[in-house]
């Protein structure tokens, strides 16, 4: 069996993968990050790792013997999963590697907005000291936090803000009821109009792409903040720029963008009421170790003829039949 790993600099080095897969008798080679480079390198490989690089239906069709796409991460929106399913390619992700880290990062962004830390830092660096220039600040306790998407990360984030005394509303049409006590369901429009902070934790799907546009952003309070650590295209970026420029909302904190990395002329980079980070919410050294372990675990199971633990397309008929592991 042969596996191909794109040389994503954020995931380097790949010593762990090489050692773990060598023990399985899996030969490892590397390739570039473009779709063409991945297809050329993996045309005769049984396994292709992926870290969010696009894999379209025509590209997948060229992976003649691929049995598994082992995805470093949670959201597989860059991969045409229906096409992979039709071809018999199993797509396995790593849904639990960075749940706590993303929730922590979202909380850090919310706190930075709540305490005006970016403006405060700039004030002091510029020789200022009058913190009344940062008014108004409001107490976090008693604030309403709206969460869009109450999956694993949304729940972890909800537990954090509830511990700080926040009231939590959530919008997640896939849930029949809250999986943890405390958060209350709300229609999206009500959540947006009631919340002092809105945090997005939904996957990118056709239903969520462009979920927040001008109409939705205008529903938010002029004192409210928007936090996004999920996927950039869930927010219509041009509408967000207008909302920040014209102060429909007080500000935003973004770890993700419609196009990544953002272009040098992206207006978000010039606005003083938005806090930005480089799609790093899931990263810690410990989380990255778990990520690699879980991705390699999927390869090990397929090599043994077993289903991976976390399969995105459970309705796939694998090119090579797989059985459930005894522990499953």
Image (cartoon, rainbow, N blue to C red):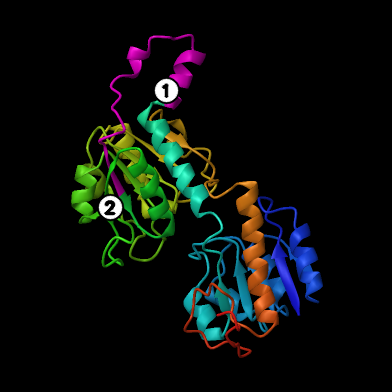
Image coordinates for residue 307, horizontal then vertical, percent = 59, 81
Q: Relative to 287, is 275 above or below?
A: above
Please tell me whether mark 1 sits on a helix, a strand or a loop. Answer: helix
Specify which label sits upstream in the sequence, 1 or 2. Answer: 1
Residue 266 visible (yes or no): yes
From the viewer's perspective, tell me whether residue 126 is left or right of residue 17.
left
Q: Which of 232 and 74 is in front in this view?
A: 74
Write down the residue under mark 1. Answer: 119
293 horizontally vs 160: left or right: right
- Residue at (60, 52) in percent of width and height: 287
- In percent of width and height, residue 49 lies at 65, 67
Mark 2 lies on residue: 183
Name the image quarter holding the N terminus: bottom right
For residue 179, side relative to residue 292 (left or right)? left
Q: Can you give x and y, in whole percent of width and height, for residue 214 in the image?
A: 26, 47
Kind of element beneath mark 2: loop
Q: Does the magenta stretch include residue 143?
A: yes
Q: Position of residue 246 (x, y in %)?
A: 28, 32
From the viewer's side, name the closer residue of 73 and 183: 183
Q: Quadrant of residue 161?
A: top left
297 lies above or below 97: below
Q: Give the range drawn in magenta.
A: 117-146
Relative side of 45 to 209, left or right: right
Label 1 Cα neighbours within 10 Å, binned few <14 / some 14-19 / many ≥20: some
How far apart are the two marked residues, 1 and 2, measured between alpha carbons?
31 Å
């Amino acid at each position: 069996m042969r596996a191909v790993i794109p040389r994503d600099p954020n995931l380097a080095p790949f010593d762990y993968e090489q050692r773990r897969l060598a023990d399985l008798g899996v030969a490892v080679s590397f390739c570039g990050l473009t779709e063409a480079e991945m297809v050329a390198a993996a045309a005769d490989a049984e396994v292709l790792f992926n870290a969010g690089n696009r894999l379209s239906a025509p590209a997948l069709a060229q992976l003649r013997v691929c049995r598994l796409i082992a995805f470093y991460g949670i959201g597989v929106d860059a991969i045409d999963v229906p096409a992979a399913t039709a071809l018999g390619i199993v797509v396995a992700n790593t849904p639990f590697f960075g749940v706590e880290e993303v929730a922590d990062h979202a909380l850090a962004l919310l706190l930075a907005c709540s305490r005006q830390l970016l403006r405060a830092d700039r004030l002091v660096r510029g020789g200022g000291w009058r913190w009344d220039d940062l008014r108004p600040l409001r107490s976090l306790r008693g604030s309403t936090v709206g969460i869009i998407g109450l999956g694993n990360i949304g729940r972890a984030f909800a537990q954090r803000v509830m511990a700080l005394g926040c009231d939590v509303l959530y919008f997640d049409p896939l849930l029949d009821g809250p999986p943890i006590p405390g958060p209350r369901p709300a229609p999206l429009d009500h959540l947006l109009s009631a919340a002092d902070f809105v945090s997005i934790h939904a996957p990118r799907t056709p239903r969520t792409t462009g979920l927040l546009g001008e109409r939705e952003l205008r529903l938010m309070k002029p004192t409210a903040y928007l936090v996004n650590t999920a996927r950039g295209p869930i927010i219509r970026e041009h509408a967000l720029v207008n909302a920040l420029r014209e102060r429909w909302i007080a500000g935003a904190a973004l770890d993700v963008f419609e196009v990544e990395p953002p272009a040098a002329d992206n207006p978000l980079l010039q606005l003083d009421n938005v806090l930005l980070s480089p799609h790093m919410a899931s990263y810690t050294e410990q989380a990255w170790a778990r990520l690699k372990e879980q991705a390699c675990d999927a390869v090990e199971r397929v090599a043994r003829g077993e289903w991976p633990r976390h399969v995105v397309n459970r309705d796939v008929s694998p090119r090579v039949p797989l059985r459930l592991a005894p522990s499953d």
